[in-house]
Image (cartoon, helix red, strand yellow):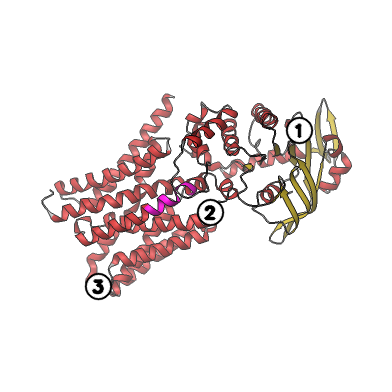
């Protein structure tokens, strides 16, 4: 399996992506902002297809749009953060806009499937390096804001009283989420980012009650699901995104099941 | 030195003035209960003391210093939010997130920080229950954890915003007694807001009643009277004392009890 370049690239690409997704996803679940993450990926779809249209690599259009979207959501803060309807409308408008851009560029019909459902087997070595660099930036930024972010996520009023700036934190955090989304789109596509960003983190929070073991488990699950999904895709010749989403969903269900069993025996 | 000093303070947001021209001084080892109808400004008053709401007029001094956000000498316990019901983190990790929570970097705890968390948990007898996830604690236990979090950094002034909300009478009594013990042993000032006076009667040094933009600070006997409360509530208030309990009545209704029930219901609808 590792004699093929494309498999080496796929395994290498999954490493930074799983790391960024496992870490930022943990806070996303903790802050109950998972829907915002989902919406950012759809905003990114319009960016990616728009980039293709003007002859730029879709990854950069994706990053530009998700970053802009993340910063905008952070600035609007609470007013938008809880409004599922507003986010949902922006989400569907972005998908529609992306569809329009694709329509102008019919030569790239396969581009749609790649963006929507991911194509990790098609990643080249240069993209792996880009993903690695973006991953380092995102993880570094998250490490810099982790303490006030945790505090403000758990106790927003108290954190504000102690001098934390919730608005600034929210903007920085959603910008990091935007990078994470742009990364995971490369692997599982716009429609399935929940599989890497939310599934592992949610399962980890079901399985452990400590902060550090939770965040560690979230990363381990994200990476495990991505790598195992790749191996299964190679042996079965079924799409990797299918395997990764199935493993992510399965892990979450098992964690929930185990959690409720534990609760009953207490 | 006063823990809190208001000189001609007017507070409000938007077009609304909540408190107007307030003068008051709270001593540095005083337990003061803060009462008043919904929307009278109990939370607004605390936010102003924390430096989160600049006064429109007048000056606020906290422990001898001008009011400022991020004042480490103030411990604050905000009103409980429903979101904590679902939290799977342990009580200890939850409390510990408050240690130096405003500083950038990773939420790593050094030896001093771990000792400080252990001290705060021990002060509220929450060392054992802090091992459980927050989602599996009762309302009374959760309030003790929030109180421990407010004690981090050894504040000289504690602001507790409605800690009795949605607790049954036994747990209410336990929280009041615990707060009184902490206040006396640590020699600190406490502002404790509540809907009902009775659960706090034995513990209070003075009461602060807010209503219609005004404030009245004094002993229970001075402030909880028909004339003073009628002026604050803006309607005819009768104060009835029965067996050491005090009922604040308006047109035959128990004002404080009704307000509490109303709020209780709203809390559950929200969740």
Q: Position of residue A165 (x, y in %)?
A: 54, 54
To which residue does mark 2 refer?
A166
Give the labeled residue for mark 3: A106
Residue B238 lies in what quarter of the image?
A: top right
Q: Quadrant of the C terminus of chain B?
A: top right
Q: Numbered disc 3: what chain?
A: A
Q: Residue at x 68, y 61 (%)?
A: B14
Task: Return the residue at label 1.
Answer: B204
* Point 51% across, 26% down: residue: B128
Q: Please state, as top left, top right, bottom left or bottom right, where the N terminus of chain B lies in the image.
A: top right
Residue B193 visible in image:
no
**Vertical placement of residue B110 versus A91, above or below:** above
Residue A65 left/right relative to B136: left
Residue A149 percent location from the top left of the image: 48, 49
Marks 1 & 2, CB-CB < 8 Å contact: no
Residue A57 vertical position relative to residue B263 in the rendered view, above or below: below
Q: Nearer the viewer, residue A117 or A211?
A: A211
Q: Is residue A96 left or right of residue A14?
A: right
| Residue name at image x 85 percent, y 34 percent | B221
Range drawn in magenta: A140-148
Q: Nearer the viewer, mark 1 or mark 3?
A: 1
B119 and A18: which one is in front?
A: B119
Secondary structure of the residue carrying numbered label 3: helix
| Residue A90 in the image, given as x and y percentages of width and height | 44, 63
State if disc 3 and disc 1 touch (CB < 8 Å): no
């Amino acid at each position: 399996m590792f004699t093929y370049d494309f498999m080496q690239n796929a395994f290498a690409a999954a490493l930074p992506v799983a790391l960024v997704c496992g870490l930022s996803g943990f806070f996303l679940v903790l802050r109950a902002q998972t829907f915002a993450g989902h919406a950012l990926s759809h905003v990114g779809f319009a960016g990616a297809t728009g980039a293709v249209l003007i002859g730029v690599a879709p990854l950069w259009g994706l990053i530009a749009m998700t970053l802009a979207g993340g910063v905008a959501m952070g600035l609007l803060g609470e007013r938008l953060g809880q409004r599922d309807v507003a986010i949902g409308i922006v989400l569907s408008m972005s998908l529609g806009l992306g569809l329009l851009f694709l329509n102008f560029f019919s030569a790239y019909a396969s581009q749609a499937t790649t963006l929507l459902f991911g194509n990790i087997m098609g990643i080249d070595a240069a993209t792996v390096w880009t993903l690695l660099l973006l991953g380092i930036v995102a993880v570094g930024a998250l490490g810099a804001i982790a303490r006030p972010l945790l505090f403000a996520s758990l106790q927003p009023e108290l954190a504000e009283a102690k001098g934390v700036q919730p608005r600034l934190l929210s903007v920085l955090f959603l910008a990091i989420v935007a990078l994470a989304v742009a990364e995971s789109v490369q692997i599982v596509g716009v429609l399935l980012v929940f599989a890497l960003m939310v599934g592992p983190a949610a399962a980890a929070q079901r399985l452990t009650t400590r902060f550090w073991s939770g965040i560690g488990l979230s990363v381990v699950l994200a990476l495990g699901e991505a790598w195992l999904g790749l191996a299964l895709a190679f042996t079965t010749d079924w799409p990797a995104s299918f395997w990764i989403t199935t493993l992510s969903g399965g892990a979450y269900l098992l964690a929930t099941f185990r959690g409720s069993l534990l609760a009953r025996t207490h | 030195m006063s823990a809190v000093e208001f000189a001609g303070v007017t507070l409000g947001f938007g077009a609304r003035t909540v408190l107007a021209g307030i003068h008051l001084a709270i001593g540095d080892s005083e337990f003061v209960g803060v009462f008043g109808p919904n929307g009278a400004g109990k939370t607004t008053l605390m936010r102003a003391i924390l430096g989160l709401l600049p006064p429109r007029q007048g000056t606020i001094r906290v422990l001898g210093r001008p009011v400022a956000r991020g004042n480490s000498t103030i411990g604050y316990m905000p009103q409980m939010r429903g979101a904590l019901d679902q939290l799977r983190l342990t009580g200890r990790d939850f409390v510990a997130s408050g240690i130096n929570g405003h500083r950038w970097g990773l939420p790593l705890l050094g030896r001093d920080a771990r000792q400080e968390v252990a001290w705060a948990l021990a002060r509220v007898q929450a060392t054992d229950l802090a091992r459980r996830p927050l989602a599996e604690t009762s309302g009374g236990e959760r309030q003790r954890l929030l109180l421990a979090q407010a004690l981090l950094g050894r504040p000289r002034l504690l602001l507790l915003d409605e800690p009795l909300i949605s607790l049954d009478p036994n747990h209410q009594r336990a929280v009041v007694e615990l707060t009184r013990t902490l206040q006396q042993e640590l020699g600190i000032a406490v502002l404790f807001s509540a809907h009902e006076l009775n659960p706090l009667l034995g513990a209070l040094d003075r009461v602060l009643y807010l209503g219609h933009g005004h404030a009245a600070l004094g002993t229970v006997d001075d402030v909880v009277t028909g004339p003073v409360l009628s002026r604050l509530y803006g309607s005819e208030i009768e104060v009835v004392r029965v067996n050491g309990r005090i009922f604040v009545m308006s047109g035959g209704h128990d004002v404080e009890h009704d307000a509490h029930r109303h709020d209780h219901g709203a809390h559950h609808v929200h969740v």
